[in-house]
Amino acid sequence: MASYKTGEKCPTSGIYKCKTHPQNTIPLSKGEKFPPCSWGGGHGAVWIFVRSA
């Protein structure tokens, strides 16, 4: 299971979920930086690849 931290560049366009708040999913394009999670007041996150978009 591929995972990436806030600030890292996205290697594959797709849908990612926050490890801490798995109900929070985001679409991200290749080359974009992973953002902080917007849930729980906002925090640095570990994002887990769900599927290609």
Image (tube, helix red, strand yellow):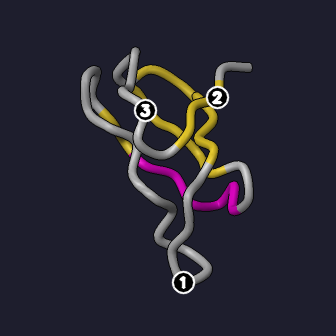
Look at 59% across and 41% down and name the residue there: 47
Which of the two marks, 2 or 3, is nearer to us in this view? 3
* In magenta stretch: residue 51: no
Badge 1 amino acid: Gly
Using the image, determine if residue 3 lies above or below residue 24. above
**Cα–Cα span, label 1 and label 3:** 21 Å
Front residue of this view, candidates 42 and 39: 42
Residue 30 image-quadrant placement? top left
Viewed as shown, does residue 1 lie left or right of 44? right
The CA span between labels 2 and 3 is 10 Å
The residue segment tinted magenta is 21-26
> Which residue corresponds to mark 1?
41
Callout 2: few (<14), some (14-19), or many (20+) C-alpha neighbours within 10 Å? some
Residue visible at 32% across and 38% down in the picture: 33
The quarter of the picture where the C terminus appears is top left
The reply, left or right, for residue 24 in relation to residue 30 is: right
**Residue corresponding to mark 3:** 8
- The amino acid sitting under disc 3 is Glu
**Around disc 3, counting alpha carbons within 10 Å, would you say few (fewer than 14), some (14 to 19), or many (20 or more)?**
some
Compared across the picture, whether 45 is left or right of 11 comes to: right
Q: Position of residue 31 (x, y in %)?
A: 25, 23
Q: Amino acid at mark 2?
A: Ser
Name the residue beneath numbered marker 2. Answer: 3
